[in-house]
Image: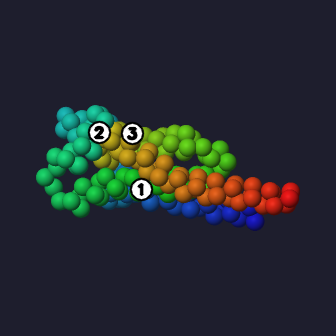
Amino acid sequence: MKIIYKLVLTIVLVVYLAILSKLILFKYIPLTEIIQHFNFTYSEYHWRSNNFIPFKTIYFYLYLADINLSIRIENLVGNIIGFAPFGFILPLLSKKFQSISTVMCASFCLSLTFEILQLLFEFGSFDVDDLILNTFGGLIGYIPIKFFSLFIHLKRKQIMRRENL
């Protein structure tokens, strides 16, 4: 039964990562044009469109942006919600991801991988704020798992106390 559980979770993780890759890396690029983006020729505009300053984009969307509210929400909340399943699935899949620090590190590394791919292959633009929001999203996904495991732990303690009486 445990093998089937792990297999299903692994399949869910793979499908989730495929969907996330499509949404992050290939949202503006038709699948037929992906190969053309695997080059290392950059224009000056490419480097200017990236954000390497922490909280610059977040601040812009929260306080300065003169754009539609739905675009703000899509960019800020979308980055958080997009990584919440990652923080939820990892602790269920492996005991190595039971601590908040490992989930945070894994979320950060996955986000950094996406951002570097966007930077290198011009699939989008690198934004350090996406790293912050995505990592936060992974942590938000981890919270229900942590509460559930604490709840189970407390229930087991109560049962053990009753049995010892």
Packing grade of label 3 (10 A; few <14, some 14-19, many >=20) is some
Mark yes or no: residue 82 visible.
Answer: yes
- Which is nearer the eye, 116 or 68? 68
Sequence-first tag of 2 and 1: 2
Name the kind of residue labelled 2 in the image. Answer: Phe
Label 1 neighbour load within 10 Å: few <14, some 14-19, many 20+: some
Q: How is the image coloured?
A: rainbow
58 vs 30, nearest the viewer: 58
Residue 93 figure quarter: bottom right
The residue carrying pointer 2 sits among few (fewer than 14), some (14 to 19) or many (20 or more) residues within 10 Å by Cα, namely some
Residue furthest out toward the front: 165
Disc 1 residue type (three-letter): Gly
- Residue 92 picture quarter: bottom right
* Residue tagged 3: 116
Marks 1 and 3 sit apart, C-alpha to C-alpha, by 17 Å
Q: Nearer the viewer, mark 2 or mark 3?
A: 2
Q: Which residue is mark 1?
A: 82
**Seen in the image, is 65 located left or right of residue 76?**
left
Looking at the image, residue 30 lies above or below residue 131: below
Q: Nearer the viewer, mark 2 or mark 1?
A: 2
Which tag, 2 or 3, sits closer to the chain's start? 2
- N-terminal of the pair, mark 1 or mark 3, is 1
In the depicted structure, whether residue 43 falls above or below residue 11: above
Label 2: which secondary element: loop
